[in-house]
Image (spheres, helix red, strand yellow):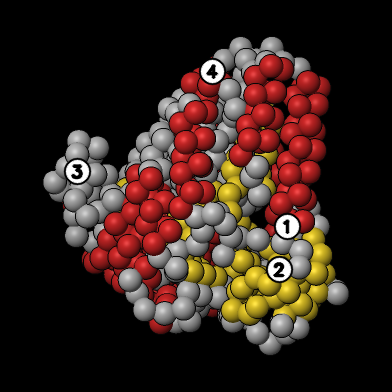
Amino acid sequence: MHETNRAISREALDRIYTQCDRNRGPLLERFGRQPRGCVVTFGCQQNEADSELIRAMLLEMGCQLTDEADDCDILIFNTCAIREHAETRVLGHLGEVSHLKIKNPRAIAALCGCMAQQGHVADKVKASYPYIDMVFGTHALGRFPALLAGRLMGGRRAFDLEGDAHGVILEGLRPQRAEGPLAWLSIMYGCNNYCSYCVVPFVRGRERSRAPEAVLAEFKGLIAAGYKDITLLGQNVNSYGRDLGGRDLGGNGLAAGLDFPALLEQLAATPGDYRIRFMTSHPKDASKRLFDVMAAHKSICSSIHLPVQAGSDRVLAEMNRRYTVAQYLELIDYARSVMPGLGLTSDIIVGFPGETEREFEETLSLLERVRFDSLFTFIYSPRKGTKAADMPDPASRADKQRWFDRLLDTQNRISREINDTYVGQTLRVLVSGPGEDKGYPMQGRTDGFKLVHLQGAEGKTGQFVDAHIEKRSTWALFGRVK
């Protein structure tokens, strides 16, 4: 394994599992029964993947997993720091922990994840939330069993934002995944891009790629276990492998055979009936070669989440995105030329500091030109420590809300128009489980990531079915299994 991988050693992994085992007795003694552990996750898929590791450690400690946050013994909030709204929401939940402690005085509560990695948040918790027993950041995830042990022994509240090593990869720690056909598979961690609005590099650290042999081994294990839809995760999957060393390919910083398209080719060579997805991609690192690899392999989904963020070159430059609108459009046009049915989603930030009405209109023009299937849309939220937080921001909140509403109206119309084209078609859908529509009680996704509510799919979770699409909404299709 490459040293630049910074994966924990076998000895360190053994220490994690040993500490989990040692915690069993004190936990039983503290609660007088098998303790119930609950992990509440906020934020992105990478946070979900981290929560799967935390749940695995709880199980190793003899805990029973529960989703009942108000009736558990160990409550962990795994948090997001992307937007101010997410932080405010988490702090509201922390306030409710006092009620859990009144009901269950021996309960233990912890805050972890990206929000916890920020020093000002840890200071706020220390001062204002005395019933939170532990705060540990993304770099200290593997320290959770040891921190818990200290608290069980009567130690003081624990605040660990450093961990055993900055940016360590918990290679070999087996995640506790949810039941069903879907799985997350982290291939790298961290980010080197430093977009001016984004706090991720500060809370997730620099890019660290997992060794390709480790990724491939875990992927084959997921296929053997029956998972059908596997999403490869990274803050920027397109830069996978750049930190692994080896011979440079054409001066682009990639080690021979270790870049992301090459990894995809290795994974797609695995026998079986499954789908590969990935997120998130950065347009500056997406390539025609990537799209060629996607088009060449049936098991790689013809869908991509490619965040554009804005339709103005000036705003993109201020965001430090390092591509232009023309370069983005060139990528999209090529991807659609080799994958005509490409499913395309993106992110848009409205009201970035200094954005004008005319520049916002350029974003609307981009939507009309590209015609995304759907968008994740946000009004700009300043994040402490980022460059954008100190930029002049003359646009009013009312203007930003007006722009945001126009953006939603435009995208909703486009989404409906795209979904109209699917009515009457028969689509291959992977049934993921029960849905929320009583008339169409099951749900699943197409290759292009379209959500489909299904009739006639009861008992078919984890199976691919052919569904005749009968109608649509703005965000979903409705079909009957043939």
In front: label 4 or label 2: 2
Give the quarter of the image for residue 436. Answer: bottom right
Q: Between residue 315 and residue 71, name the one nearer to us.
A: 315
Q: Which residue is mark 1?
A: 421
Q: Which residue is mark 2?
A: 425
Residue type pointed to by label 1: Thr
Chain-order first, disc 3 or disc 4: 3
Chain-order first, disc 3 or disc 2: 3
Rounded to the nearest angstrom, the CA distance separating label 4 from label 2 is 42 Å
Rounded to the nearest angstrom, the CA distance separating label 2 from label 1 is 8 Å
Q: Are marks 3 and 1 in contact (CB under 8 Å)?
A: no
Image check: 31 left or right of 291? right
Q: Are marks 2 and 1 in contact (CB under 8 Å)?
A: yes
Rounded to the nearest angstrom, the CA distance separating label 3 from label 1 is 42 Å
Q: Give coordinates of residue 114: x percent, y percent.
A: 51, 44
> What number is the disc on residue 249?
3
Q: Give coordinates of residue 112: x percent, y percent.
A: 53, 51
Local secondary structure at mark 3: loop
**Residue 376 appears in the figure:** no
Rounded to the nearest angstrom, the CA distance separating label 3 from label 4 is 32 Å
Chain-order first, disc 4 or disc 1: 4
